[in-house]
Image (tube, grey):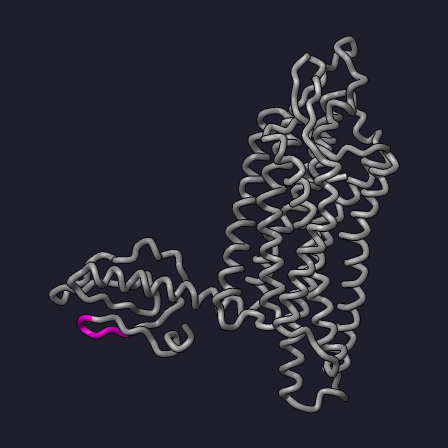
Amino acid sequence: MNISELGLYLWNGSSNGSAADGYLPSLEVLEPEFQVALILIYSLTATLSLTGNLTVIMILGFGKRSSGDLRLFLINLAVSDVTMAIFSIPFTYTMFLLGRWVFTPWFCPIVLGMQHVSVFVSVYTLTAIGIDRYKAIVTPFNRRINKNQSKYVMAGIWVGAFALSSVQLYVSSAREFVFYNGETYYECTEWWDSETSSQLYTVFIFTLTFFVPLMGLAYTYSAIAWSLWWRVSPGNAYHHRDKAQTKSKMKVIKMLVTIVILFALCWLPLQLFLLLYYFYPEISAYRTESEKRVYALSYFLCHWLANANSFVNPLVYCFMSDNFRADLKELLCRRMRRRTQRLSARSPTATRVTMCPMLTTTVHNGESSDNVLKKSLFLPCLCKARSSSSTVKWSASVEDRL
């Protein structure tokens, strides 16, 4: 069972209804006003996911402070979230809302396969991070995963994800079906020989991508928390340096645990919905528009929560990682410096940059003109600078870090 399949059974689930019952099934599951609202919500979700995770990739790739030993893992997690935003949000939402596959038929198994890939990569990257933290904190004298080994681990995760998801290339396809009004449409879903096979596969996916990894993560982070707790107790922490290092590790662990908890909370409703649907298909057997609306909105809520997980990680990094915020500010300063230098090169007058870009002024014959960088008013005070009569000199404290 895949997360794109449910909408295509909406009218099948109610096919026992008829015009004589006063109810005519429709492929479009919601009224236009609901459709507009969902278009806005899903568009915002996709935009936040793409921009947020691409920003994370840029900061982790070019920043100098952000989680050096976790850099590859977090970049991999961001890439999997981008994959989810590209292959799940637009296709699943469209297929469920319209009740049919409106894209090229051959693209169907690729989309369903990539949806599984993104979930596999996300959860097993989180698992790899948990194992790495466990080895670093609970068993510090054992060999840790070095940078080269991390690359092999990431490659192995992607290879394993594609291998497990390759099942979709065999069981998924877009097939034609005739609606009750005589119109022919495409249905993109999994086609199994028996209901039992489909149920077994659904349980297998749930176990492999949700239950087992989260149980493993619960154990590793519980062991980590226990280890750090005893290290900071009064009888065990002898040196101020040790306390500071333990406090720093605790901040990283809190951030990682938050990411894992959010992953579980975001994906649990959809996982349960899929299990209920496959083992209790009567939940989709509605006969009225109100029942249909409740069913559709319930699915959209579960599906949106799962996809929303793709943009929450950048928010977690921003609010819980001082190094991430520092790298973000530094990269913004670098961009502002280049922009100011371009403006200075175009203007014959000198530019003086003060604590904030919003205070940048142009001096000509001793008089100040309007703000040169009006478009930068929204930026916080990130950079400090001093100027001579003709050049812009950036503060050494910022320059040394760029």
The residue lying at 14 percent from left, 67 percent from top is 366
Of all residues shown, which one is farthest toward the right? Answer: 196
Of all residues shown, which one is farthest toward the top? Answer: 20
Quarter assignment of residue 387 = bottom left
Quadrant occupied by the N terminus: top right
Q: Does the magenta portion include 84? A: no
The residue lying at 31 percent from left, 73 percent from top is 394
The residue lying at 83 percent from left, 38 percent from top is 198
Quarter assignment of residue 53 = bottom right
Q: Nearer the viewer, residue 24 or 149?
A: 149
Q: Nearer the viewer, residue 88 or 296?
A: 88
Quadrant occupied by the C terminus: bottom left
Provide residue 392's location: percent of width, then percent of height: 25, 70
Q: Nearer the viewer, residue 196 or 356?
A: 196
The residue lying at 65 percent from left, 78 percent from top is 247
* Numbered range of the magenta stretch: 386-390
Quarter assignment of residue 16 = top right
In this view of the protein, can residue 301 be seen by the observer? yes
